[in-house]
Image (cartoon, grey):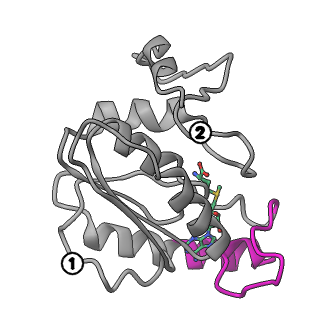
Amino acid sequence: MNTNNAKDFIPERTTVWDFPIRGDWATHKGDYRGNFAPQIARNVLLNYSSEGEMVLDPMCGSGTTLIEARLLNRNAIGYDINQNAVDITRARLAFDVFNSSQQRVERGDVRTLSALAENSIDLILTHPPYANIVKYSDNQNPDDLSSISSIHEFLDELEIGIRELYRVLKANR
Ligand SMILES: C[S@@+](CC[C@H](N)C(=O)[O-])C[C@H]1O[C@@H](n2cnc3c(N)ncnc32)[C@H](O)[C@@H]1O
């Protein structure tokens, strides 16, 4: 597996980030619709968290945040409403690293993270659906935010999720 490719990574120092080539190190692939370029997750993790801290991605898709957390020695929890995304993320986390960080992913809804205690997370890095422009559920799962056709309803439901994220995020993070 190509984990060395990340050695070419150059940390971003301004608010405009430009990646001419999408990173493909470790198990990253650009095959999940609307996934992060791994450089995005890497920049955010390096700038806003430290080794050993706990990172949450509650809409983790193909697991870009968790893969980078594993490579960078951050613990991480991932959730996604779609079992397909959970399965992809689990498969892509199955590689060896020389650190003791732990990552886990479960099926879950960003709006109800009852398994997580308040003030328990050091960094949240997530990437919601684009309203219903890209639909992530083939079977029209009503809990999938991308199945909501009204933009007002989408924003209301997303706000419920954001409030839940605020609950679990530690103060001043
Ligand atoms: C833009 S994608 C995330 C892509 C991810 N950053 C990556 O790099 O692969 C948005 C994800 O939100 C998930 N999602 C939609 N509604 C959700 C909900 N209520 N709770 C958790 N995840 C949800 C979708 O299944 C989809 O995987």
Question: Image point 25% across, 40% down: which residue?
Answer: 49
The number of callouts visible is 2
> From what the image shows, is residue 124 above or below residue 40?
below
**Residue, disc 1:** 117
Left or right: residue 4 compared with residue 18: left
**Residue, disc 2:** 28
SS assignment at label 1: loop
Q: Position of residue 153 (x, y in %)?
A: 68, 80
Question: Image point 17% across, 46% down: which residue?
Answer: 52
Question: Image point 17% across, 52% down: which residue?
Answer: 172
The stretch drawn in magenta includes residue 155: yes
Q: Position of residue 36 (x, y in %)?
A: 60, 42
Amino acid at circle 1: Ala
Q: Which residues, given as a range, are shown in magenta?
A: 133-158
> From what the image shows, is residue 114 above or below residue 105?
below
> Marks 1/2: CA distance?
30 Å
Left or right: residue 112 compared with residue 107: left
